[in-house]
Image (cartoon, coloured by chain):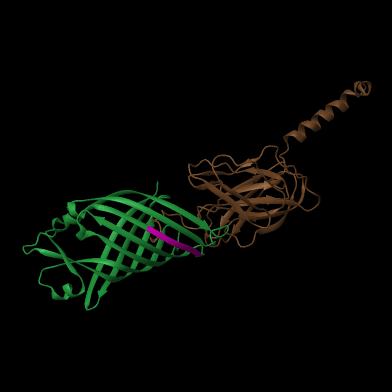
Chain colours: A green, B brown
Amino acid sequence: MWPRFDGLDRAAAGARLGWQHKFGLGPFAPLLRLDVSGDLVAARESGRAGRAGSATLSARQRLSHWALAQVAHTWTRYDGRAHAFDRTGAETALSLTASPSAAWRATIGVRRWNGGVLSYATPPREDLIKEGKALTIVSTFDRADPLVAYYFIARTETLRLEVGRTLGPRAEFALGVEWRNTRRGALSYRNRIVSAGVLFNL
Amino acid sequence: MNRKISTLPAGALACLLALVSFAGDAPAPAVRVDIRDSQGNPVEDAVASLHPLDREPQLVPPAEPVSIVQRGQEFQPYVTPVVVGTRVRFPNEDSVQHHVFSLSRAMAFDLPLYRGEPPAPIAFERAGIVSLGCNIHDWMSAYVVVLATPHFGRSGAEGEVSIDLLPAGRYRLEVWHPRLREPETREIVVDAGPTTQVISVTLGADRRIRRAPDSGPGGYR
């Protein structure tokens, strides 16, 4: 659809193991959950393929029949076929969901990621060298001048708003918008992301 | 005894047969309750019950247990009226396990994770509203309405309940629904023939938990 970004296309298949404990009976009892996942990731650019693993500890508290609060902490690790695309880090997420009706929900969430970040830039970039390291030349984005992937450890803070509409008891359409700010020293990146998807539970 | 009947005059026997025939044709006392919301729409899953005021009702629970099935990760039916002493079974027809429980004062119980048929039915020995849930699937919700009267029914999509085979007398008509803050009550007199009671109720908000796919930990549900 967008040829410049075809190199970022990925598909993953894997498994997830979960354990959860509810501290009592009923929807208002707090819930603690541990999830461990592993995925094999295929990518159009072979160097980006690899193995992903994560462990998430999450807690959930329903505040009323229409309000739900969640907090989660996730450790992730990605081992790419090309080491330039390895990525490790941890993320803490907080979210509050309101369901004013059986059909609709709105969620506001904040997340903070501490870990590896890749930045693609045309050298020379002394500012990036100062904070991280140049790893590889990439041709992902069909640019006339080659781009260099710089890796550094940074903090990314995200605000996300999402609206969901049920499509029957097992499916939901979700539309979300995210504001992401990544900072490391003097470096600062802003991303604005709009996402849409359909979630289906078997 | 046989001799006495044989000595009845032919005219008296004819009168008796006529009387029996007349009683057989008379409409039996029955009450039809038509339950509407404030917009005039029929109210489904309401329970109408008639509580005798002039006598103690005879409470005979059914010999076989009543079933509330878990199917498609929902309880079916949503509302089940039963007489005090009724046993209820909770078969799980889903491929996933459920954990059925109630924290209600009228009947608190807990059936930890199971598939298929739980070990034994549960007897509901105390009148009141029993709210059911599944401790895994928060949206699953149902009610058992335990009644100290044998005269009751649940409304279907047309909002009607028919209660027949009633002894004549005074009754308290009570209408309950999960979205009613308090039951609607009124006193009625049942005599020969059917009567219709139209009950208008003001339903509160539907407080059921929204059902939606779980996007997993750290995601948004």
> Residue reaching furthest bottom?
A186
| A202 left or right of B129 in image | left
The residue at the point 13 percent across, 75 percent down is A126
Look at the picture and state if A20 lies above or below A194.
Answer: above
Q: Quadrant of residue A166?
A: bottom left
Location of the N terminus of chain B (image quadrant) = top right
Give the main secondary structure, helix, strand or loop, of the magenta stretch. strand
Quadrant in which residue A128 is drawn: bottom left
In the shown orientation, is residue B19 left or right of residue B147? right
How far from the left and from the top, in percent, is residue A195?
A: 28, 61
Against B196, residue B221 (above or below) is below
Q: Is residue B217 magenta?
A: no
Q: Is residue B28 above or below residue A199?
A: above
- The part of the chain drawn in magenta is A55-62
Q: Position of residue B187 (x, y in %)?
A: 72, 56
Q: How many marks?
A: 0
Between A126 and A189, the one lying in front of the other is A126
Residue in front for this viewpoint, A139 or B164: A139
Q: Is A193 positioned to the left or the right of B145 in the image?
A: left
Pick the front one: B57 or B70: B70
Q: Is residue B41 visible?
A: yes
Estimate the x, y position of residue B138 in percent, counting from the top left.
Answer: 51, 55
Give x and y (percent) for residue A65.
Answer: 51, 62
Task: Report the residue at 23% width, 75% height from top.
Answer: A188
Q: In the drawing, does residue A153 fall left or right of residue B79?
A: left
